[in-house]
């Protein structure tokens, strides 16, 4: 459940080069972030997303899928 006034964002491309930077900015601006990641995504890239969220004192959600 989202807090009153909190926007939810579904981010694709989060494990790419710019993804962690986008996640960081969204979290800093109090967005609730769900990242769509491929099943075959590099685990270190996913860890980097989680680390970025932890530094911001927030949590992100991960959803596995593919936009084909």
Image: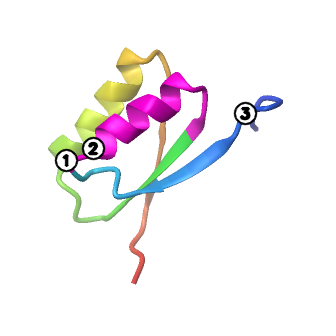
Which contiguous range is marked in magenta? 17-32
Q: Is residue 39 above or below residue 22?
A: below
Choose the circle earlier in sequence order: 3 or 2: 3
Whole-Å distance between the Cαs marked 3 and 2? 24 Å
Q: Main secondary structure of the magenta part?
A: helix
Image position of 62 with respect to 49: above or below: below
Residue at mark 3: 6
* The image quarter in which residue 40 lies: bottom left
Residue shown at 17% from the left, 53% from the top: 42
Nearest to viewer (mark 3 / mark 2): 3
Element assignment for label 3: loop
Q: In which quarter of the image is residue 38?
A: bottom left
Q: Residue 43 carries which label?
A: 1
Q: How crowded is mark 1: few (under 14 residues within 10 Å), some or many (20 or more)?
A: few
Q: Identify the secondary structure beneath mark 1.
A: helix
Give the residue displayed 39% in from the left and 40% down from the top: 22
Q: Where is residue 53 in the image (x, y as percent from the top left)?
A: 40, 27
The answer for how far apart the CA atoms under marks 1 and 2 are is 5 Å
**Residue 2 highlighted magenta (yes or no):** no
- Number of residue marks: 3
Spot occupied by residue 66 in the image (x, y as percentages of width and height): 39, 73
Q: Which residue is drawn at 60% across and 37% down?
A: 32
> Mark 1 near mark 2, Cβ–Cβ under 8 Å?
yes
**Disc 2 packing (10 Å; few <14; some 14–19; many ≥20):** some
Regarding mark 2 in the picture, which secondary structure is present there?
Answer: helix
- Residue 30 location (% of width, % of height): 60, 26
User: What is the distance, in whole Å, between disc 1 and disc 3 at their CAs?
Assistant: 29 Å
Nearer the observer, disc 1 or disc 3? 3
Residue labelled with disc 2 = 46
Query: Which is more toward the observer, 15 or 40?
Result: 15
């Amino acid at each position: 459940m989202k807090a009153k006034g909190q926007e939810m964002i579904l981010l694709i491309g989060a494990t790419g080069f710019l993804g962690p930077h986008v996640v960081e900015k969204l979290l800093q601006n109090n967005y609730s972030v769900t990242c769509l990641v491929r099943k075959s995504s590099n685990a270190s890239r996913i860890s980097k997303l989680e680390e970025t969220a932890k530094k911001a004192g927030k949590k992100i959600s991960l959803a596995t899928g593919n936009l084909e």
